[in-house]
Amino acid sequence: MEKTAVLAVVGPTASGKTGLGVELAKRLDGEVVSCDSMQIYKTMDVATAKPTKEEMQGVPHHLIDLLPPETPFSLAEYLTLAEKTIGEIHARGKVPVLVGGTGLYVDTLLQGVQLCDQGEDAAYRAEMAALAEKEGSGALMEKLRACDPDYAATVHQNNIPRLIRALEVYHTTGIPMSVHIRRSRDGESRYEPLWLGLRYADRSVLYDRINRRVDLMLEQGLLDEAKAAYETRMSTAAQAIGCKELYPYFAGEKSLAECVETLKRSTRRYAKRQLTWFKRNEAIHWLEPDVLSKEELTEKAMDIIKESNLFPNWEK
């Protein structure tokens, strides 16, 4: 099987993936394919840190702003869209540049993971949704940690749809989601990925970036987005970090300062989980933005790309 070369730029939130991905796409005559489970939704621009038109710098971006925020969206649906999009980019003679931090999505797409029949139980889903509404998402996380601690470590507590799906899989099959995923890795990937990852030699630098990004998001209108999600009780895109942490403020239960601090802490913890996830991938070439200047980072990435011999477009 002839495989399609794909450049993957991965790493934690606020690490600089968007900027590097755009710069490399410009150098390679490529197009960016988002691998973010929340940027697929319309509106929610600030909360999901979607790249602006200025940040895109004229580079085509795909799988952003496709669905209304209340629409459920699954891993299987992402794979269908991503495979079609990558095929179209490749057919145009362009380089697919996958950029994102949703580790489950990018690994499943690029590593030949075959999704198994994992069972469905609508009544159980409704029961778990009611539990989350009554006791909060923490109750779902406790249940998931009890039956599948490995998968629980990869899911944010606010991501209620993924928590419910993992519980449903265990409920209907008796097999944890993490085991289903491991068993599904026997397929052959249709892609030849080159992995570039961003991490910080000094983790505190990344955490400072996250704190500053939250402050900037507030300046850019995060409160308005979160309030709209709160008032309409959206159950999908509203689970993005950046919305739910602010709900106690709208409910008059906590001050804005307290909620913002919770948001920063949640985002830092999410970044740590992302790093833990990607750390398992021994194929990733790691780059450290706090050690290299922006220009040095791009040049080092290009050196890795040239040495791979996967992307002849770099010579253009």
Image: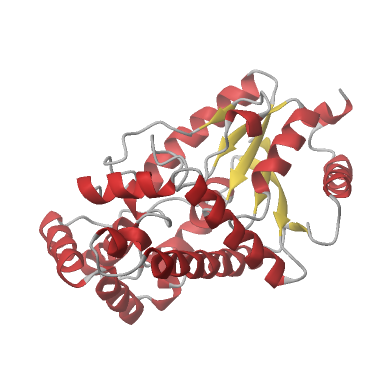
Quadrant in which the N terminus appears = top right
Q: Is residue 156 visible?
A: no
Residue for point 36% across, 44% down: 224
Quadrant in which the C terminus appears = top right
Residue 182 in the image: above or below residue 15:
below
Residue for point 83% across, 44% down: 298
Q: Is residue 296 left or right of residue 136?
A: right
Percent from the top left, x then y, of residue 282?
71, 64
Q: Is residue 290 left or right of residue 6?
A: right
Q: Quadrant of residue 200?
A: bottom right
Residue 66 in the image: above or below residue 306:
above
Percent from the top left, x then y, of residue 133?
17, 64
The single residue placed furthest to the left in the displayed view is 123
Q: Is residue 271 left or right of residue 23?
A: left
Q: Nearer the viewer, residue 211 or 286?
A: 211
How many marks overall?
A: 0
Q: Nearer the viewer, residue 154 or 50?
A: 50
Residue for point 56% across, 50% down: 216
Q: Is residue 127 visible?
A: yes
Residue for point 18% across, 65% down: 128
Residue 106 in the image: above or below residue 281:
above
Percent from the top left, x then y, of residue 83?
51, 34
Percent from the top left, x then y, of residue 219?
51, 47
